[in-house]
Image (cartoon, coloured by chain):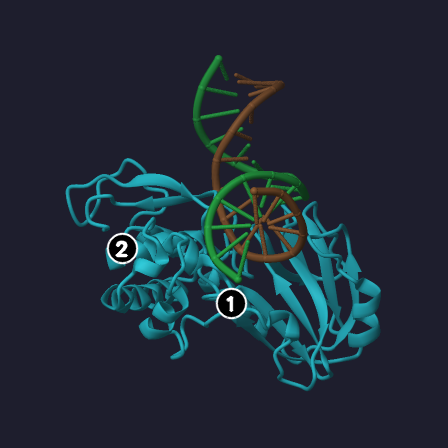
Chain colours: A cyan, B green, C brown
Amino acid sequence: MPELPEVETVAHALNKAIQGKLLRTANSYSRLRKPFECKRIVRELAGKQCITVWRRGKYIIMEFDCDFVLIAHLGMTGAFHIENARQKPDRHDRAALIFADGNALRFKDARRFGFISLAKIPHRGAMPKELDSLGLEPLEPEFTAKAMQERANGRTVPVKTFIMDQKVVAGVGNIYASEALFLAGVHPARRSGTITGNEWKKLVPAIKKVLRQAIKAGGSTIRNYQTVDGSEGGFQQRLRVYGKKGEGCERCAGTITVARMAGRSTFFCPECQK
DNA sequence: AGAGATACCTGGGAGC
DNA sequence: TGCTCCCAGGTATCTC
């Protein structure tokens, strides 16, 4: 389940892998959440050089030396891998970018929740308008307790759901939302508008800390996630509540409990998260 | 407009 | 061993 740390790890690896390469063509093997527009992609990007690859929220942006970018989302099970273009795609490969040097960047996605789409930008280095609605970037200075308290004012959704709202904060998903709330000692079901300034001063740094630690560990491998070279992330060993229903809390005598919030499993300690 | 539910999709694990 | 059932969840879209 790729969240910000996994996407960061993948974007970094992709940047190393394809920066400077010339796109030759593209292939589509089956449909994704949004159609992979092979013909349009080839028309706009063939012969163009990949300039850089970066991340915004959970989206990966591949820049080329023109006014188009590719926006990729890994969905639940998306992964990129590089191999020789002559190699046969395997069962779950959905699309490929073929480079002039003979390498293929294949997008593998068993559940097809991911996508790669072409977007026009006003000028090189600009943010595609498709990503305008994304909220605060949690590792940037703009992500502060004050900004979050303002946005939460009057809101009644559980704070867990609130911090997973991509229009509020971009990049926090189900795993790290549970982990950050645990670190901050905040109960996930609390209505977001009732979180005090002091609580946001614990929760905002907790989100940053959890994300930074996970990036350092190369992400968490929960079920599906793989890095570009096929290796697994190391953060799952450091998870404190996610997936730990029935286990003892590491901080108090409580037992980790699971509840559903907005249809998602939410793990927390009912004793020390208030 | 905000909140919650549902659809999309398929591998994998649980239970029998 | 092999079958069925259900869960995992990011996002778009719907209903209230």
Residue sitting nearer the eye, A63 or A178: A178
A202 in relation to A2, above or below: below
Q: Residue furthest bottom?
A: A123
Percent position of residue A190, x then y = 32, 52
Snapshot quadrant of residue A85: bottom right
A255 in relation to A237, above or below: above
A79 in relation to A253, above or below: below
Q: Residue furthest left?
A: A253
Residue A18 visible in image: no
Percent position of residue A152, x then y = 39, 64
Name the mark nearer the viewer: 2 or 1: 2
Q: Residue at x 22, y 40 (%)?
A: A248
Quick one: label 2, few (<14), some, or many (20+) residues within 10 Å? many
From the image, tell me which residue sits under label 1. Answer: A57
Pointers 2 and 1 in contact (C-beta within 8 Å): no
The local secondary structure at tag 2 comes to: loop
Q: Residue at x 22, y 44 (%)?
A: A249
The local secondary structure at tag 1 comes to: loop
Q: Residue at x 17, y 50 (%)?
A: A251
Residue sitting nearer the eye, A28 or A232: A28
Q: How far apart in space, not on screen, are marks 2 and 1 (Cα)?
A: 23 Å
Amino acid type assigned to the residue bearing label 2 in the image: Val
Quick one: label 1, few (<14), some, or many (20+) residues within 10 Å? many
Subunit ID for the residue under disc 2: A
From the image, tell me which residue sits under label 2. Answer: A186
Compared across the picture, whether A131 is left or right of A174 comes to right
Precedes in sequence: disc 2 or disc 1: 1
Residue A136 visible in image: yes
Residue sitting nearer the eye, A69 or A106: A69
The label number, if any, that marks residue A115 in the structure image: none
